[in-house]
Every structure is written in C-alpha cells, then in structure tokens.
Amino acid sequence: MQDFELYRQILGLEHPWRVESVRMDRKAGEIEVTVSCVEQVWGCPQCHQRMHIHDYEERRWRHLDSCQFKTFIRAKVPMVKCPEHGSQQVQVPWAEKYGRFTRLFERLAIDLMLECSIAAACKELRISWDEADGIKQRAVARGLERRQAEPLRLLNIDEKSAGRGQNYVTVVAKVEPGKKAVVWHVSEGRDKQCLDAFWENLTSEQLQSIQGVCIDMWDPFANSLEEHLPEAAEKVTHDPFHIAQHMNDALDTVRKQEHKRLLQDGDQALAGSKWYWLKGWENVPESWQERFFTLRSSTLKTARAWSIKEMLRDFWQCGHEDAPEYFDRWYSWAIRCRLEPVKKVARMIKKRLGYVLNYFKHRLTNGTLEGLNNRIQGLVKKAYGYRNRERFKTDILFHLGGLDLHPGQ
C-alpha cells in the first residue's frame, strides 16, 4: 500500500487515475507500475466532445529509473469513438500522445543529448540509438510547432557541406545584436528552390520586418532574395569575408602561375611564400619581413596582385559616403592590371556592387554564421559524420535552433 501511494505521488496521479500494482523483477532489473482509471465520461482529444469509453488499449512507457532499476508504467488506456474524428485514445497525464516514454524521461534524455553524443546518452539511459533518435526528432518537431512568427530583422544565409562532393545544406540564421544567433531554417541543397521554400513559409509581417540579409556571392541565393524579399536592393548585403576569400584565391592563382614560370628558369623567388602573400602586411612574421618586403617591392605579378588585394582590404574601412569613389579607384586599377584572375574578381564585384555597398549601410557580415558553422562542424565530428541529411538537419535545429524542445509538464 505504501508502494502504491509512493508511486502515485511520484507520478502525480489524480482522479480518475490510480496505481493498481507495483511489481519488481530483480533479475531483469525492472520495476513495473500498473496504472488504471475508473469508469467515467471522457472527451475526444481533438474536439473535446463528451463521450463514453468503447474500448481499451494496453500500453507501456519507460519512466525515470527507481534507484538502479528501470521503471515502466503499464496502463489500459481508454479509447473513445468520436463521430467526427473516429476512434481516439485519451490523453494520459504522464506522457505525450503516441510517446513510448514519459514526459520526465524525455526531458532527461533531451538534456543529456544536448550535452553529449547520442551514443553516450544511449549508454547512460540504457535505450537504443533508434529510441534516442525518435526522442530527438519529436523534440525538434515540437519546438518548430511552438515557434512563434516573430520579427526576424537581421538574417545570415550560407551553405554548409553535409558530406563529400557537392553535398550541401542551406542554413538561415537569425542574428540579434548582443545575442547568440539561432538557426531558423535548414534545407537540403543550395539551389534557389531550397531558399524559396523558406520565404514562402514566412508571414507577410515577417517579410516586412526584415531589415538586412547577408549572403555570399552565390547567384541562386541572390535570385531568390530578389524574387521574394520586399526592397531587396536596399536590404541585401554581400559578405565582405567571402569577397576577401575570392580575392585571396585570385592572388594565389597568380602566384602559382608565376611560380611555375619562374621555376622553368631556375628562379626560386616565390618558393615557400604562399601563406605570407595571403596575410595582411601587418601579420607577416618578423623572420619573413625583410624577404617579404623585397618581394612585394619587386616587379613580380604576384606583388602587383597582393597590392590590389591590400587596397581592397582598406575598402571596408571607408565611410558610407566615401565607399563608391574608393571602389571606382580600386576597380580602375584591378581591371587594368593585366592579371586575369584578379580582373575576374573585379568584374564579379562590379556586377553586384549595389549589394556590396549595402555593407556600409548595415555593417552586416556572415561572421556570426561562420561561428555557427564551426559548431555545426563540431556536431559532424561528434557524430563521426552523417549519412542521412535529414538527421543532419534535425541535429542542427536540435542543438542550434533555439527551440523549446521539452515536452509539457
């Protein structure tokens, strides 16, 4: 009798539910609590119309352990037959609908999986990987359902590699000054259609609330924004760090081409210098400064490309009024430099100059999202990679989506 009262209070059971029996299987290391309910009129779980029980379904749920014993709840759950919604199982107070675990157990499982790998959580909880994955998927679905249609204001959009080859997911993050960014949307691929789906799920109020969006220079993203975002020409910014990366790639291409030509003449001037050309002049190590000063003061094509790259770095320090004039001077030099890789980057920037200049209005970069990308890479390492992109997307939202994951009390 004392066991009945103890578990009634532990489970928080009230009329019409009561503990009918408590059985311990020492060999199996399990405790099973049988719960029953008294006859009464129930309501349909969906429309709440009052109706009588027409059948019972026996179910079993895993609960928090009692000391070292696994604890299970067993109950015959009433079934009601609604004229509108058909046969329905009534809601039990200790678990979510269709769940195989109690709410308290799922809360513990979610907290563990937020702190460690799913394999470690399974070992601690003594459940299978599939059971833990099911808890995670339900938690994400619950969090997305609870998410309010709040203003978005500032967004970062970028792709993240999900495996080998051209295997990507597109990540949209909400950025708030002084707050951690949260992943608002993850879709498979990085084409225009995957981003179109994001805009189509927003309300008109949310679309109007967006003040700035930062993207790299990937045309499908820009095309999607131009089609769906009101006043996109004033709100979209190209990420300065991606532009700098394009310029560094162009510089390195010039260096490799010139180094190959010099080696044919036995000239080792550029040997071992790759990483120093990619650095800013102030970051070159002291041991290299004398040699590097000689190289960048020479007539090498690589030195010319480096100077153009450094001038582009200074472009981002301009004020809003000075930036267009500064860019015109940089572009004039870059397009006449007779270095095709550099000219290609210059044309690319010129093509989307409006979005580039928007940086000086919003001062918005993808730096915050790059931080999130590092955390996403941490998830990949912790999971030893993902073969299933749906699970990859679920993990991103589970850990970085800022969702309310826990089941209700």
Image (tube, rainbow, N blue to C red):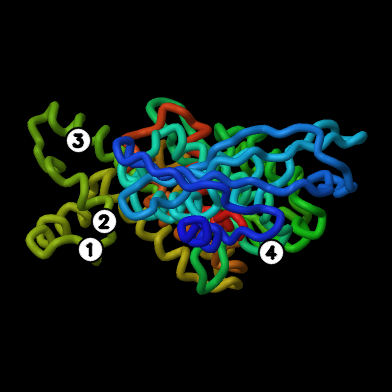
| The quarter of the displayed image where residue 357 is located | bottom right
Residue 270 in sight here: yes
In the displayed structure, 13 sits above or below 247; it is: below
Q: What residue would you read off at disc 1?
A: 283
Q: What residue would you read off at disc 2?
A: 279
Q: CA distance from mark 4 to mark 1?
A: 35 Å
Q: CA distance from mark 3 to mark 4?
A: 46 Å
Image point (64%, 55%), residue name? 236
Q: What residue would you read off at disc 4?
A: 211
Instruction: Kindly indicate whether the residue at mark 3 contacts the one at mark 1 (C-beta within 8 angstroms).
Output: no
Viewer-side residue, 307 vs 156: 156
* Rendered location of residue 290, percent (x, y): 10, 61
Q: Residues within 10 Å of mark 1 (few under 14, many from 20)?
A: few
From the image, which quarter does the C terminus lie in? bottom right
* Rendered location of residue 291, percent (x, y): 10, 56
Q: Which amino acid, by three-letter code, is at mark 1?
A: Asn
Viewer-side residue, 168 vs 75: 75
Residue 259: mark: 3
**Element under disc 2:** loop
| The quarter of the displayed image where residue 377 is located | top left
**Element under disc 3:** helix
Relative placement, left or right, of 385 versus 336 is left
Residue at the right extreme of this rendering: 83
Q: CA distance from mark 4 to mark 2?
A: 33 Å
Q: CA distance from mark 1 to mark 3?
A: 23 Å
**Element under disc 1:** helix
Viewer-side residue, 36 vs 47: 36
Residue 220: mark: none
Q: Which amino acid, by three-letter code, is at mark 3?
A: His
Q: Residues within 10 Å of mark 4 (few under 14, many from 20)?
A: some
**Element under disc 4:** loop
